[in-house]
DNA sequence: GGCCAGGACACCA
DNA sequence: TGGTGTCATGGC
């Protein structure tokens, strides 16, 4: 069922191409990490505004973030919401990354346990960083995933690790599938299937009558 | 003008 | 262990 849903969503929505980066940040994976923290419970469009502010001010690189006053950083990332909390988190996270000498080395060596032990990074943010920045096969479970598959009757739990394990058991050994699947579930979750034209060709007609 | 978004954490019983 | 409050802007 899990693979079937993936195929249907991919055919319906097409590749989502996550994670979008601007090519202005080197390495691009660093922008993924920053975005992963800024997008916590926040619309991606607002995150893009915050990322743009950081780029325009030319302070998105780790050194600049570490040196910057937290209030100044908060001001720049304001559009992403929870800006005081996120500014503090982003600064501490940057210091954590640079303790591993370089972003590249962080990407190569960081473990899931280390990320989860960091105050401000929960399972979803950790797995997003691992999957989209580090290139590890780590399925990202979010509220949409839980809601969609619970309503479909495929799962009967809210437990993050249980759901993640179930997906990872069923998915092929292909990181592109992991990356695309999570993005597709977000796309589906954001879609109000009561509205045309989605409903007429909804890939998951059984649950299409409800707003999923 | 209300609702919610690509969460996480502290606090409490 | 589970429920609740807090953090907050901006699009729809």
Image (cartoon, coloured by chain):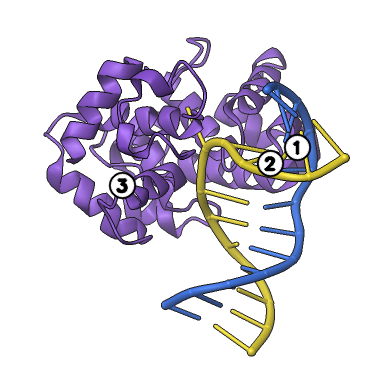
Chain colours: A purple, B yellow, C blue
Which sits earlier in the primary sequence, circle 3 or circle 2? 2
- Whether pointer 2 and pointer 1 mark residues with C-beta atoms closer than 8 Å, the reply is yes
Q: Earlier in the sequence, mark 2 or mark 1?
A: 1
Measured as percent of width and height from the top left, residue A176 is found at 23, 24
**Dot in front, 3 or 2:** 3
Q: Residue at position x 47%, y 53% from top? A: A122
Residue A85 position, x and y percent, is: 69, 48
Q: Give the percent coordinates (x, y) of residue A206.
A: 31, 38
Front-lying residue, A104 or A179: A179
Decide: is B3 above or below A63.
below
- Residue at the far top: name it: A23
**C11 or A139: which is nearer to us?**
C11
Q: Is residue A44 left or right of residue A196?
A: right
Disc 2: host chain: A
- Image quarter where the N terminus of chain A lies is top left
Location of the C terminus of chain A (image quadrant): top left
Query: Which residue is labeled 3 in the image?
Result: A152
Q: Secondary structure at mark 1?
A: helix
Quick one: A212 or A166, which is closer to the camera?
A212
Rate crowding at label 3 as few (under 14), some (14 to 19) or many (20 or more) other CA atoms within 10 Å. Answer: some
- Density class for disc 1 (Cα within 10 Å; few <14, some 14-19, many ≥20) is many
Numbered-mark total: 3
Marks 1 and 3, the one that precedes in the sequence:
1
Alpha-carbon span between mark 2 and mark 1:
5 Å
According to the picture, the residue beneath numbered tag 2 turns out to be A87
Q: Who is closer to the viewer here, A111 or A181?
A: A181
Q: Can residue A125 be spotted in the picture?
A: no
Q: Given the image, what chain letter belongs to the residue carrying mark 1?
A: A
Q: Which residue is mark 1?
A: A74
């Amino acid at each position: 069922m899990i693979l079937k849903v993936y195929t249907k969503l991919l055919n319906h929505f097409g590749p989502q191409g996550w994670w979008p980066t601007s090519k202005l940040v080197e390495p691009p994976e660093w922008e993924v990490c920053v975005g992963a923290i800024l997008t916590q419970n926040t619309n991606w469009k607002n995150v893009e505004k915050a990322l743009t502010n950081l780029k325009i001010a030319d302070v998105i690189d780790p050194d600049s973030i570490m040196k910057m006053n937290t209030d100044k950083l908060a001001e720049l990332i304001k559009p992403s919401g929870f800006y005081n909390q996120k500014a503090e988190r982003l600064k501490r996270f940057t210091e954590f990354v640079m303790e591993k000498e370089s972003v590249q080395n962080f990407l190569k060596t960081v473990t899931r346990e280390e990320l989860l032990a960091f105050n401000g990074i929960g399972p979803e943010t950790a797995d997003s960083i691992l999957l989209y920045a580090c290139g590890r096969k780590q399925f990202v479970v979010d509220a949409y995933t839980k809601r969609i598959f619970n309503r479909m009757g495929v799962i009967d739990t809210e437990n993050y690790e249980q759901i993640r394990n179930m997906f990872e058991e069923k998915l092929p050994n292909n990181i592109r599938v992991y990356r695309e699947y999570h993005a597709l579930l977000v796309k589906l979750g954001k879609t109000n299937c009561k509205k045309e034209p989605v409903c007429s060709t909804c890939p998951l007609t059984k649950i299409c009558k409800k707003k999923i």
